[in-house]
Amino acid sequence: MKQNSRSSRSKHRAKPKSRLRLPDLEFSKTAVLSSMSSRDGQRGYAHAIDEFVQWYCSEPRLTLNRTVVLRYRGHLESRSLAPGTINLRLAAVRRLVSEAVDNGLLSADLAAGIRRVKGVRNLGVRMGNWLTAEQSLALWQTPDCSRLKGRRDRALLALLPACGLRRHEAVGLRIEHLEQREQHWAIVDLKGKAGHVRTVPIPAWVMEEIRKWLNSSGIDRGKIFRRVSKGGKALGEGISERAVWHIVDRSGKARSSRSAPNLRPAMSRLGRRTGTDPVSPGTCVNPDDRALSGLQAAYSICSKRSDWDRTGADGFATRSGIRDR
């Protein structure tokens, strides 16, 4: 009797699937996104999984195994995508398969074969549109400061390279983040990529541009950067990341730049190359020279790792324990 009961249990025991249907894929996708804390990571993986699901469902109903993933890699290569983009798509597929195995939706043997699919080799280093300190200064001076929109763009273009902020960090920046510590302004407890919290010093000339924008727009609470109407009034509760990209791209093209410059990589790159000491405010006669020395100081500061051992162009010690993450 015991043997019969054991055999009946083994017969009724559910076997892992070899083909995932759309509800199974959606369930695994939700599990993958819920396990990630970074909003940027969730957006990237969601896009990569959606592309794979669309390709997988457009093909004849296939067993999800190593051969299918190799075919998908060939499909990505045929689209002439960058190696980093292809490897990101494959990483999302591996994560999707792992969640499917953990939830009993796919066989572990098939998942082991999928994990053995190698990515594409990245040969060489792609050069971005990086700016020098002089070019960053020219980019910051491009918008017309006589208009409200120009004051907003100048404040944004001064903040991005000098403080090394990402687009979503600049968009989410609030007045409450600006605090005065030891008689100097800083962005306190800024939550960045993957939940990393850091404090970023603000040079005096950048804070001056932010004050001009806030005073002229009448913003006293909430997010710093807002939309501007054609009539010259601040609207809404903020701007989008795409709007920031358009502002940088428009200003870059006005300065004969081929595409939108990469301000953050340019900052870290110049920080490793600049070895000059920042200039004190008393030695700067021209405001442009002061802004230029401020950019060089910011580049130099953010590449160091000691604590408050570097003096910025506005004369205050800047905490360089702020990591460039």
Image (tube, helix red, strand yellow):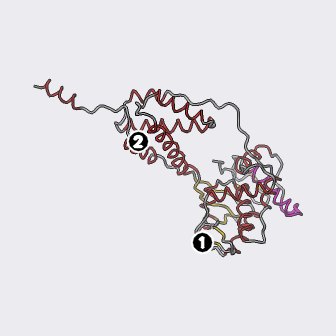
Which residue lies most toward the left here? 1
Displayed quadrant of residue 209: bottom right
The magenta region covers 280-300
Instruction: Count the marks.
Output: 2
Per the model, the C-alpha gap separating discs 2 and 1 is 43 Å
Displayed quadrant of residue 159: bottom right
Mark 2 residue type:
Leu
Secondary structure of the residue carrying tag 2 is: helix
Residue 64: image location, x then y, percent: 42, 32
Residue positioned 77% across, 64% down in the render: 143
Residue positioned 68% across, 30% down in the render: 123
Residue 302: image location, x then y, percent: 71, 50
Displayed quadrant of residue 291: bottom right
Give the number of the disc on residue 92: none
Secondary structure of the residue carrying tag 1 is: loop
Q: Does residue 238 appear to the left or right of 66 in the view shown?
A: right
Camera-side residue of 81 and 198: 81
Residue positioned 41% across, 39% down in the render: 99
Q: Does residue 57 appear to the left or right of 131 in the view shown?
A: left
Classed neighbour count for the residue bearing mark 2: other residues with Cα under 10 Å, few (<14), some (14–19), many (≥20):
some
Q: Mark 1 sits on what residue?
A: 221
Q: Mark 2 sits on what residue?
A: 25
Q: Quadrant of the N terminus?
A: top left
Classed neighbour count for the residue bearing mark 1: other residues with Cα under 10 Å, few (<14), some (14–19), many (≥20):
few
Cβ atoms at labels 2 and 1 below 8 Å apart: no
**Depth-wise, is mark 2 or mark 1 nearer the camera?**
2
Residue 318: image location, x then y, percent: 72, 56
